[in-house]
Amino acid sequence: MTRNLQYGRGLVWLRNDLRLRDNTALYRAAVSCGAVAAVFIACPKTWKSHDDGDPVVNFRLACLRELQESLAGRRIPLYFLEVASFDEVPSALQQIVRKLQIDAVFANAEYPFNEQRRDSAARAALQEAGVPIEYSTDRTLVPPGAVRTGSGDAYKVFTPFKRAFVSQCGATDFSPLPPPRQFDGDKGWPQWLQIAGAHNLVQTIPDTVRGYRALPQKDGKIFGWMPGEKAGARRLREFGEIIDGYEDERDFPAIDATSRLSPYLNCGAVSIRQCAQLALGLNEGRWVGGSEGISCWLGELIWREFYTHLLVAFPRLCKHQPFKPETDRVPWSGDELAFRRWCQGKTGVPIVDAAMRQLLETGWMHNRLRMVVASFLSKNLLIDWRWGERHFMNHLIDADFAANNGGWQWAASTGTDAVPYFRVFNPYSQSKKFDPRGEFIRRFVPELHELNDKEIHCPDSAADYPAPICDVAQSRKHAIEVYAALK
Ligand SMILES: Cc1cc2nc3c(=O)[nH]c(=O)nc-3n(C[C@H](O)[C@H](O)[C@H](O)COP(=O)(O)OP(=O)(O)OC[C@H]3O[C@@H](n4cnc5c(N)ncnc54)[C@H](O)[C@@H]3O)c2cc1C
């Protein structure tokens, strides 16, 4: 077949889009170039400054290893380079394109403030080298900013955003893109290259990068999570079999009723279009209506979209600032000991402790419990939500700045469309309602194993288990007064 190709040699710059299938940048490179290579540039110093922890970095590198094999099958070499920070990326890319004689670079857009700044600097550096770079929409269903109010502003509230998203984009074809074609044999790609001021560009993916611990793997799994595109695709397929029950069961942490796709979505081993396509395919193409389970899950995908759109519309969210500036006047307690007890799952409030231990042991926490523990920290303990946001980033295997910041600002009532300040989750009622038989608590707080289904939510006393760190009713009242005084 003769191809009318625009470029000779293309480079795909991979970031959090670690998959072969339905990868817009990879697809664009494959249809427009005669030969394609890929590169991943690790920036551990910047990752640290963004609070990326060992779980997310280990998972990312493991997904990258699997992707390298898949790409090799298509004769696309994947190079790896470690520099310290985003600042060094533009010059590194300049050297790479010169040495590999690249005609065009392809990448999928990323939206947090520092990522956007890095990408503009990369564009300028590549321009200097005479090489164009094309950024594609891939992380979200539609580009941030595409859904706007009648007067052209960004939406600040979820429900109207969702309504507008469905009416403006509901009929859009989100069909996944095919994987890149198979390229011909040897295109003279070198095994490695020297890059000034950085490590060598190599074709081996290391177990870890500077400042990060290589976590032990068991049967290829990290914290029980099998990395990679194939595992992500399997999980999506399996979730399709239980998606109808999502709305009814998603709030019960002892039940495996949610998709658990977040680690895959965040490093890009699964694409958002693949998720939308599966759900829409099962729901006769409908975003709302049809199966309640499916439309509820599609709503969660729109929440993900909403939080990413917010980052772009309000860059101050990326600068440790609350959406509502007045909430910066909350007199946070600064109690480091209480914070440590919260982090370790030793607050004496069983559902909070079970959740915090789930995070430490599995790198993941159930959504209902993320809300409960975030409310407990920011309201009952009156500890700055940013401390909790940071702990989550450090420990979650699905750590994602947009969703995490959005979730924390929602729970702490500092965000746009947040929970009203006077609504404070009662951890004991949440526990009784969503873990009625204490199954989840028993799984993660073995000290309470012997207690009956009633006592387990609020034990009077149990060996080796601390008394509650605070009086939930009193601290709730205090938090409401503090927030009310901000007005
Ligand atoms: C305080 C707090 C912190 C959070 N931190 C993160 C985080 O770092 N990374 C992260 O991916 N999610 C975060 N979330 C959102 C949500 O808890 C997780 O996305 C969800 O628990 C992941 O499990 P799942 O894949 O089984 O989700 P499902 O219920 O199956 O949902 C499917 C997908 O929709 C998206 N999604 C679901 N709920 C939300 C939401 N509220 N906001 C944005 N996207 C959502 C996720 O991509 C998720 O994988 C946070 C929520 C809160 C309250």
Image (cartoon, helix red, strand yellow):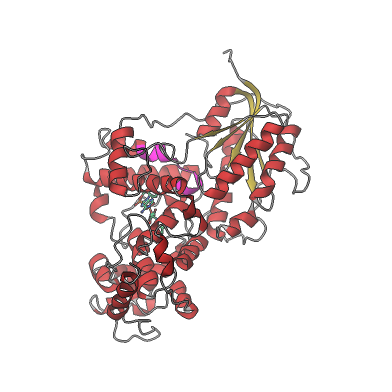
Residue extending farthest top: 2
Q: Is residue 149 left or right of residue 219?
A: left
Q: Residue at x 26, y 37 (%)?
A: 283
As for residue 266 lying within the magenta part, the answer is: yes
Q: Position of residue 4 (x, y in %)?
A: 58, 15
Q: Quadrant of residue 96?
A: top right
Taken as a whole, is the magenta stretch helix, strand or loop? helix
Q: Does residue 54 sit above or below 337 in this rendering?
A: above
As for residue 121 lying within the magenta part, the answer is: no
Residue extending farthest front: 487
Q: Which residue is at the front of the view, 227 or 34?
A: 34
Q: Is residue 454 left or right of residue 467?
A: left
Q: Position of residue 272 (x, y in %)?
A: 41, 41
For residue 269, say whether it is visible.
Answer: yes
Q: Does residue 479 sit above or below 149 in this rendering?
A: below
For residue 354, say whether it is visible.
Answer: no
Q: Position of residue 211 (x, y in %)?
A: 65, 61
Q: Is residue 184 left or right of residue 360?
A: right
Quarter of the picture containing the C terminus is bottom left
Total label count? 0
Q: Residue at x 34, y 70 (%)?
A: 483
Q: Is residue 52 left or right of residue 339?
A: right
Q: Which residue is at the front of the view, 60 or 234?
A: 60
Q: Which residue is at the front of the view, 369 or 183?
A: 369
Query: Magenta span covers which residues?
Result: 265-276
Q: Does residue 304 sit above or below 1 in this rendering?
A: below
Quarter of the picture containing the N terminus is top right
Q: Position of residue 380 (x, y in %)?
A: 35, 75
